[in-house]
Each structure stands twice: as C-alpha cells, then as structure tokens.
Amino acid sequence: MRRECEPVLQKDLEEVPVVALLGPRQCGKTTLAKILATSPRGAVYLDLERPSDLRKLSDPELFLGPLADRLVILDEIQRVPDLFPVLRSLVDQHRHPGRFLLLGSASRDLFRQSSESLAGRIRYRELTPFTLPEILEGKVSLEAHWLRGGFPDSLLASSDPASLRWREDFLRTFLERDVPSFGVEVRLPLFERFVRMLAHLHGQILNWSRLAESAAVSVPTAKHYAELLEKSFLVRLLAPHEANLGKRLVKSPKVYWRDSGVVHALLEIEGLEDLQGHPVVGASWEGYAMEEILRAVPRAQPTFYRTQSGTEIDLVLTQGTRRLAVEFKRSSAPEATRGFWQGLEDLGKPQARIVAPVESGWPLADHVQVVSLPELLAELKDWRS
C-alpha cells in the first residue's frame, strides 16, 4: 500500500536541506522514511528512542559531520530538542538538499521553539494514518477503514478484536509514555479521564465550563489538555465560521477525534454491528468523512457554520476564492434540513455537497449534490493543483 505523499517527500529532499515528517506515532513514518532512504548515495537511520543510537550522538557534530554526503534520518526528533542548533550548524557548513530527514510524533507547534534555529532550511510535511484513496487502492473496504481507522497495524490486523486490542495498547502507550516525553506536565489519572470524556463529545460543540466540571479540572486545564491532544495529532478542534453576516454565531469549537478507530476504541466499539447500533454512529461517520476531506485539501481553511438559532452547516471549506459547504448524513436516502438550506442562504449560496454512504450521487438543487465520499475526494483533487 503506497503512500500518496511519497513523491512529494522525494521532491522535498531534492530541494531543501532538512525535511521534517510529522505525524502520530505508528502511522507509518519510519516505514516511509526507509523507502525514501534507498537512494544511490545511501542513508543512515537513527532511532532516538534507542539508547545505543542516542549514545552515538553524545558528540553530534563528531558523528554527523562526516555524513555530509548521505541522507541522515533521525526518528522521534522531539526527544532531543537540543539537536536542532547542531543541525543548523552542519547544514550551514555543507548546504545541499537532502541532508536530514526528521521524523516526529508531535506537531510543529509543540517543538516550534526548538526548531526555530532551522528557519529557512527546513520544510514540514504531515503524514496521517492511511487515507481512504490509499486503502481502496490496496483493496481494503471503506467500512473496515471507518471501523478500525487508518493506523496500519490496526487496519491490517487479523480480526476486529485484534485490531481493537492494538488501539487500546496504542492509547495506553500514549498516556503512559508519550505524554510525559513531550515535557508537558499533566496529572495522568485526570488526563485519562478527560480523554475518555472527550470521546463521548465527538462531533459536538465544546462547552468548556461543563467539560471542565465533569472532568474535575479547571477550564484552563481542560483547554490545555485539549490543546495537547490536538498537537499530538489525535484531536481536531474545528473553529466556527466568523463571517460578519449580522447573525449571532456560535463561538466555541467542535471537537473531533482524527482517527475513527481511536474514538471507537475509547467507546469500546469492537465490530460494525456494535457501531451501527451505537448512538455515536452519526457523529462517527461525520468525523470520519470530514477528516478524509481535510486530508485531501490540506491548504483549505475548515470551519463550521452555526447560529444561535440552530442554523448549521457541518463544514465550510475556503481556499482562495473557492468555497464549499459540506453536510454529512449517515443515510442512503439523505434529506437536507431547513437549517442547512438557511445556512446556504446566509453564506450566499455556495456550492454544496451532502456526503452519504451511497454508491453514486445525484443533484438535489442547482448548486447542491448528494455524493459518496470517494466521489467528493475525486472532485477535490482540483483544489490541490
């Protein structure tokens, strides 16, 4: 199963000295990096979680200096933030493309201060778990992808129970090992409780005061915990639309777990039958389809539109002069609500799509179509050019 971003990363390594490939742990960064490492000039791979590899960098300039002609891959770079100034010095001594490929399990914002020394020398890319186009090419069904999520070991597990066990282990490792390694102070029992509570709010507008009270933390702590999950690539906080339309708009974000399999594990959903009968099924489909769309158009600005009176559009995508309104329905015969039509009127009647689990779509109005998720992803390819 090939990754769509492989040729993009290959081009990056031909253009800039340092490329940072960021994404959640276990999403396939190391595998992809080792594929990219099969270059004629060779590569050196160091896992900075391995004590033996870390010892090689006790004097980083001494070890890395002679490797100026080879691609050096440094995995879990966020664990050694002091290395960034050294990399800058080495790049400035021998400045040519493809010197370092940095792999990190934390967002750019989480180690921005450490990586500032590489400004002008580094290009950032994000790798997600497997996307829908990638898995369909690999002959994995949409339903399996939705249930298990895109993490390779979860998606390709031998059974649904084995997949669920992998995701439970993944979450336990994140809570017990990864969070402390970020250098961020959290009270783990409270944080774990917060994480599980946030799973039940998947697809909902956050009420910070109510969430903090239920999790037995302060509002600033609740926001801090949510921000940590967001910067660990696990949660997406979708901002509300802020157009000046003379309407009273909702101002709090919506929360979505970025990988559907992870939220299903938190809610103890094992199989498709469990999912279909669970109250979260509609929100799960909405979050799953939305994340696939946002992966397809990484430069678009995503928001949701909702007024205090209840007029709502699930997703508004804006990129330059382009704008698309998207609604999600877990029905093979979806119907648009009055609030959706009113929302389109408020926004000036942009093009709109209703994403549903259908084989193929049909027009609903002049500017509104019902579509399948693969159809919309194919349509959005134009946004990437």
Image (cartoon, helix red, strand yellow):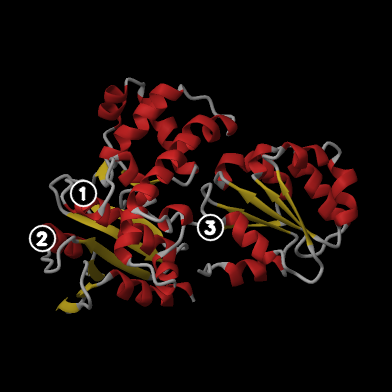
Residue drawn at (40%, 56%), measured in percent from left and top?
158
Real-space CA distance between mark 1 and mark 2, rounded to the nearest whole angstrom: 27 Å
Q: Nearer the viewer, residue 223 or 173?
A: 173
In screen coordinates, is 39 left or right of 129?
A: right
Of tags 1 and 2, which is closer to the observer?
A: 1
In screen coordinates, is 51 left or right of 380?
A: right
Of tags 3 and 2, which is closer to the observer?
A: 3
Q: Could you tell me which secondary element the residue under label 2 belongs to?
A: loop
Q: Are marks 1 and 2 in contact (CB under 8 Å)?
A: no
Q: Nearer the viewer, residue 368 or 144?
A: 144
Residue 213 is situated, as x and y percent measured from the top left of the image, at 28, 22
Residue 1 is situated, as x and y percent measured from the top left of the image, at 50, 69
Amino acid on which disc 3 is placed: Leu
Residue drawn at (75%, 69%), measured in percent from left and top?
39
In screen coordinates, is 218 left or right of 285?
A: right
Q: Quadrant of residue 212?
A: top left
In screen coordinates, is 23 left or right of 268?
A: right
Q: Which residue is mark 3?
A: 127
Amino acid on which disc 2 is placed: Thr
Residue 14 in view of the camera: yes
Compared with residue 197, is residue 4 higher up or lower down, i.e. above or below? below
Q: Which residue is mark 1?
A: 274
Q: Quadrant of residue 201?
A: top left
Residue 306 in view of the camera: no
Of tags 3 and 1, which is closer to the observer?
A: 1
Amino acid on which disc 1 is placed: Asp
Q: Could you tell me which secondary element the residue under label 3 belongs to?
A: loop
Residue drawn at (13%, 66%), measured in percent from left and top?
334
Q: Nearer the viewer, residue 87 or 118?
A: 87
